[in-house]
Amino acid sequence: MATVREATYDLLRALGLTTVFGNPGSTEEPFLQGFPADFHYVHALQEASAVAMADGYAQATGRPAHVNLHTAPGTGNGMGNLVTAWHNRTPLIVSAGQQTREMLLIEPRLASPRAVELVQPYVKWAHEPTRAQDIPAAFMRAYAMAVQPPAGPVYLSLPMDDWDRPAGAPPPVRTVATRVAPDPDRLRGFATALAAARAPALVLGAAVDRSDAWPAAVALAERLAAPVWAAPAPERAVFPERHPQFRGVLPYAIGPLSAALRGHDVVLVVGAPVFRYYPYVPGDYLPGDARLLHVTDDPDEAARAPVGESLLGDAGLTMSALVDLLPPTDRPAPPPREHPAPPEPSDPPGADGLFAALAAAWPVDGVLVQESPSNLAALRRRLPIDRPRSYVTMASGGLGFGLPAAVGIALAERDTGRGRPVVAVVGDGSFHYSVQALWTAARLRLPLAVVIPVNQQYAILKAFAELEHTPGVPALDLPGLDVTAVARGYGCAAEVVTSLERFGPALAAALAGDRPTVLPVPISTEVPKIL
Ligand SMILES: Cc1ncc(C[n+]2csc(CCOP(=O)(O)OP(=O)(O)O)c2C)c(N)n1
């Protein structure tokens, strides 16, 4: 009879989960024992990196990913990026070892006595099987739970003495739906409101990209002749950003956001929270008596919106259905927005100058991973994204995601055979939260380019302190960090780019290489405004 271990690997194989991200410990060794040759263990040096690499890999492959953590402490190290995976809506199957059942009552070293509570509330489901032979079926349930909308992480705590036990009958491999269609009556109501609108606006969120709905979004925007905004702080690009109807990203504060929507009477929000605010700037949620229509596949997201009427449904299915229901409009298309003036030259360059150089050297099919807090607006201004699934950042606000996520994405680009070049832009503060991901990228020989705008400070926190009138905050400067030495220490190539003329060739060389390259670029220390 098969062991629990054999039955579990068989199931993981059947589900296409043959890549395991992790960092091993004693409680995981019985699961990892005799690791099958057709599986790939992606070794992260710390669990924060393991979780975010798995997240990036799942997002880039469009499939769930499996990450194996070391009981309570490993889960704790991975927790920040588990929070991020939750907000990212990434289907992650997180398994963790548990001490042997024989001793759990007396809580030996490395027992996780309340394992399923440890990860709350950032999982859709957490479970420790009551019987060893339930482990394979628990993985099947975990998979089904993770991928169904709204997708997200799930957690299994697995006692280390379960793996050699007899398995029982293998669980059937089941399939579940990953999209929900909208209620037809309510959908017609939305279409009627949009058709009657004087000046509708479209606000799109990351679910549009996750459901491969750029074509539906363009069709809907053109059918409505409406301006299109990305919802605040989006973790994906959601619309071709050179399209004449694209207006940019809405500000992430209550008052400024409603000011940006002034003049619109119907605001259709698809695939985003209403709204992802950050600094508190009071005001009305919406301009005048505008009506907000909210399409989301998450009942919780619908419920917590402070205003609006909601319709549960997949972003792509709902937008396509709306296009079919809406009559053509004779409203003229909104005028295209103005292009930003070229950046002012300076020495050292400003973020605008750096990102203009990045845009000039950008590979057409490049994937941008972003974790550069104060320079985000400059980056998005200079480098419009016009292809789907080409821009990733974290939805949570937690640093330490971007670098390891870029490693997972670069690995997925290789494993899927797509081979798109991956460029991470990571602040010199953000770089250090999961910096050990560089080692994994070097071991995997991934041609990842990591651009570090070096301003030697937590600039966004200085901007936030100014906005909030909180002077005298300590620990906002970062002197004495040698990014190059850190990069080389983990096995990466590195080149400090001190002249923007060098930037294009350095980026091209990095992407053509057979290992990751870190490109620190000293930039001006001017602090951009937060809003
Ligand atoms: C896990 C975590 N710790 C701390 C913070 C607070 N925080 C937000 S932005 C930031 C500074 C980022 O610095 P850097 O990457 O250099 O970017 P800059 O603001 O200078 O552009 C910090 C510490 C956070 N968001 N997440």
Image (cartoon, grey):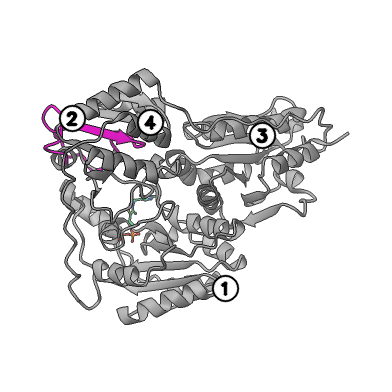
Q: Which secondary structure is most common in the magenta stretch?
A: loop
Q: What SS does tag 2 mark?
A: loop
Asked if disc 2 and disc 1 are in contact, CB closer than 8 Å, the reply is no
Residue 507's quadrant in the figure?
bottom left
The amino acid beneath tag 1 is Asp
Instruction: Report the span colored magenta.
Output: 261-290
N-terminal-most mark, 4 or 2: 2
Query: Does the numbered disc 2 mark a residue whose Cβ is under 8 Å from ligand 1?
Result: no
**Residue at point 29% right, 21% down?**
189
Image location (x, y in percent) of residue 234: 34, 46
Query: What crowding class fits label 3: few (fewer than 14 Cα within 10 Å), some (14-19), or many (20 or more)?
Result: many
Discs 3/1, front = 1
Query: Whole-Å distance between the Cαs marked 3 and 1?
Result: 36 Å
Query: Whole-Å distance between the Cαs marked 4 and 1?
Result: 45 Å
Asked if disc 3 and disc 4 are in contact, CB closer than 8 Å, the reply is no
Query: Whole-Å distance between the Cαs marked 3 and 2?
Result: 48 Å
Q: Which residue is mark 1?
A: 514
Image location (x, y in percent) of residue 449: 46, 68
Residue 321 — which label? 4
Discs 3/4, front = 4
Query: What crowding class fits label 2: few (fewer than 14 Cα within 10 Å), some (14-19), or many (20 or more)?
Result: some
Q: What SS does tag 4 mark?
A: helix
N-terminal-most mark, 2 or 1: 2
Q: Nearer the viewer, residue 150 or 238?
A: 238
Query: Whole-Å distance between the Cαs marked 2 and 1?
Result: 54 Å
**Residue at point 34% right, 69% down?**
358
Residue 139 — which label? 3
Image location (x, y in percent) of residue 223: 27, 39
Q: What SS does tag 1 mark?
A: loop
Quadrant of image for the N terminus: top right
N-terminal-most mark, 4 or 1: 4
Left or right, 149 with respect to 36, comes to left
